[in-house]
Image: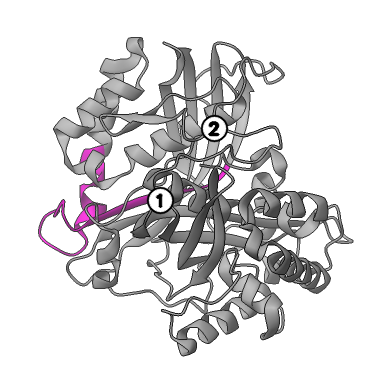
Amino acid sequence: MPFRSRRNVSSSKASGARRSSAKLWGIAAGGAAAVTAAGVVVSLTTGTPPAAAPSASAPAHSAPQASGEGVRELHGVPVGYSHTRSGAKAAAANYVTLAGSSRFLTDEDARHRSVAVMAAKDMAGAAVKKADQAAKDAVGSLRGDTSKVSAEKAIARTGVLSAHVLGFDAHGAMVRLWTTTVRGSAAGHATPKTGFQSVTVTLTWESNDWKLKDSSASTGLVAPIDVRQASNVPGDFSDYVPAAAEDPVLSGAEDRSGFPAPYGHDERGARAAAVSATMLYGDPRFFTHEDWRHRMLSATAASSVLHSVTSDTDSTARLVMENRGVGADGTTADGSELITRTAALATRSISYSNQAASVELWTASVGGVAGKDETQRPQVAFLRMTVDLVWEDGTWKTTAVTPSEPLVPSPPAMQEADPADSFANVGGVGNAPATA
């Protein structure tokens, strides 16, 4: 959350972002609570599985790995997951994000190398054919209104909003993801479009890692873009073309507290810490569970800001719950459920040293209430934010999260938003995605 204002953000932009976010949350503008709400989760306004799932009740079979020591990359593919449910969630999310990236969709050699790494041995041939077909199908969405696809200007980003383990045992896992995608081009005149998918990923534990066995996708729950966010022009997306930004990489690693394990003392570790903090502030427990919120802050915030941010976030949580009529169990009097999620679409390093770092994130936040009241239907807001971090106690801790101008794609083409009550399917602790 924003613990302080960055000096390199103009006061007019910062105050505008705070006012906008406070409106999205449905709380009064001004004060520390509005500043806090502006930082991360800002949008709180009014498929068939391809194979039989493993046993859903099987326990994890190995201890979690540290974020900086577990997941690494081979030919651009994250590998080295822990043999846990969180590790399976992370693998499923990374594989879906990678398969929807510009490089994967526009570079055949890179795509085939990636498939060779992430696919199970007995599924490699089929996986290559499926990936090539997906790339062919994506041409239209990546071209925008230009005559052909420009790999350098293509915008293809995927954010994971929820992840539910359908089955898990020592040999395999099945994970259902709810994702938002942005596809288009930073060239031409057509703004990239957002979309929502439900993706079911089947994994197998092979060669001491999670490998992709199969996946299937269908249209996911469609959340409307908040009416206060107008679509940007194509050129505004230039900072998120392939050469300018990276996809987030999730590890699913946790320490004994249940929060992300210590991050590597490098730029990649700083990016991961920034992504995790953003996602954790988007968890509904941030608002409904004081003890969880305080433990999360202790795990993510630098000691120099911990007291102030705890006070600010306590105030924000109370205001949101009072405004929405939400109780400590996350539901309203009529049983409607508070829904909040934040996904990172891409990351960019602004600065880095051994002791401090600044990372810019492009995020999608979904928030609202799943119930019969359509005026509180979950909506999505797209923000850019800068996360400042320091190296403290053997890991990266946040000192500030500052929102800047939104970066908003066009709404899904020819798709109506789903009813408010349907979003209950992606709420709850069990649907929380893996963190970085």
Looking at the picture, the colour scheme in use is one colour
Hey, which residue is sitting farthest bottom in the picture? Answer: 12
Magenta residues? Answer: 135-162
Residue 285 position in % (x across, y down): 74, 52
Disc 2 target residue:
89
Residue 169 position in % (x across, y down): 62, 14
Residue 413 position in % (x across, y down): 38, 61
Q: Which of 341 and 76 is in front in this view?
A: 76
Q: How crowded is mark 2: few (under 14 residues within 10 Å), some or many (20 or more)?
A: many
Residue 185 in sight here: yes
Q: Nearer the viewer, residue 369 or 395?
A: 395
Q: Quick check: 56 above or below 289?
A: above
In the picture, measured across the screen, residue 75 lies left or right of residue 431, that is: left
Location of residue 106 by image quarter: top left
Q: Residues within 10 Å of mark 1 (few under 14, many from 20)?
A: few
Disc 1 target residue:
354
In the picture, measured across the screen, residue 275 lies left or right of residue 75, that is: right
Image depth: mark 2 or mark 1 in front: 1
Q: Quick check: 249 above or below 380?
A: above
Residue 191 position in % (x across, y down): 29, 68
Q: Quick check: 377 above or below 231?
A: above
Q: Is residue 34 magenta-colored?
A: no
Mark 2 vs mark 1: which is more N-terminal?
A: 2
In the picture, measured across the screen, residue 416 lies left or right of residue 148, that is: right
Q: Nearer the viewer, residue 204 or 223?
A: 204
Q: Nearer the viewer, residue 122 or 392?
A: 392
